Image: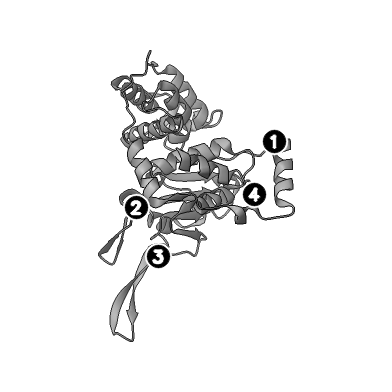
Amino acid sequence: MCGLALIKEEMNKVLVGKDKEIDLLMIALLQEGHVLLESVPGTGKTLLAKTFSHCIDGAFKRIQFTPDVLPSDVTGIQFFNPKTQEFELRTGPVVTNVLLADEINRATPRTQASLLEVMEEKQITIDGETVPLAPPFIVVATQNPIESQQGTFPLPAAQLDRFLLKIPFTYPDFEEERGILNRFKSSEPLSTVNKVMGLEELQSLSRLVKEVHVSEDIETYILQITRGTREHEWVEVGASPRASLALLKASQAKAFLDGRDYVKPQDIVEVAPYVLQHRIQLTIESSLTRTPEEVIGQIVEMAVTPVEAGQA
């Protein structure tokens, strides 16, 4: 756990009042899952992603998405080399360990779709040639709320489903914002962040997380919640089986962060909103008065909580 504690320590050099967001990012890191950060501009989404990438001793690349970014700008192209008179493969920025997809919802649907294969299968295909990515590979994407921004393209359900977690950013409170002013008024703290975890250590931790015990009762609890999203009167489209697996993985990582080798019901309760909120679609009527988070909270309350969490 030492490496994880060091990552959090380094990130707290830069970020103020973001302990919850950092913990969620660590959950995604342990399961090599992708993360979608959402908030209005200027709340620290990109800063969180950049600080996180500085802590990992792996390759980091960033794509600033705009409507004119093409799929080939993301995955790569086959280009003709006049010197050799042959076509050569030039891979794009997705060939990395941590990819910051900044303002992903400003890209056109066609460009967004270019990330589908790489996010799910950890490979890219260019003109019939398949290139596997070296592990780990994590996408940290940011987006502004679709409702308030012009020139954005909503992410399709198939793409949203590939993000392990969606983490909303809120405005800081008064004293947190004062802390931001004091921290950044005379220096750039990002330059002080050190790389504290190598890729081998990260992969070793990821293997340990997969050994965290999940009892049959906990599995039943997970399935009750995800199936509840498909049966609730306020939900038009419920969570997929991929969501059940995501909820299991996120709860394993949460237990591991807490120093346990087994999952308990509270782990599910704490991660469920971040795993499920982007995977359900409310009915038109309910969306006028409720949020996905509120509906998920009700579904979790309706599920039968296991009396005891079985330990390995």
Q: Residue at x 74, y 46 (%)?
A: 182
Image-quadrant location for residue 234: top left
Amino acid carrying mark 2 in the image: Pro
**Of marks 2 and 4, which one's residue comes earlier in the chain?**
4
Amino acid carrying mark 4 in the image: Gly
- Which residue is most to the front? 2
For label 2, the SS is loop
Q: Residue at x 33, y 34 (%)?
A: 245
Residue at label 2?
A: 135
Amino acid carrying mark 3 in the image: Gly
As drawn, is 99 to the left or to the right of 288?
A: left
Where, quadrant-wise, is the C terminus in this rendering? top left
Count of residue discs:
4
**Of marks 3 and 1, which one's residue comes earlier in the chain?**
3
Amino acid carrying mark 1 in the image: Asp
**Of marks 2 and 1, which one's residue comes earlier in the chain?**
2
> Is residue 164 in view from this perspective?
no
**Of marks 4 and 3, which one's residue comes earlier in the chain?**
4
As drawn, is 42 to the left or to the right of 98?
A: right
Q: Position of residue 175 (x, y in %)?
A: 73, 36
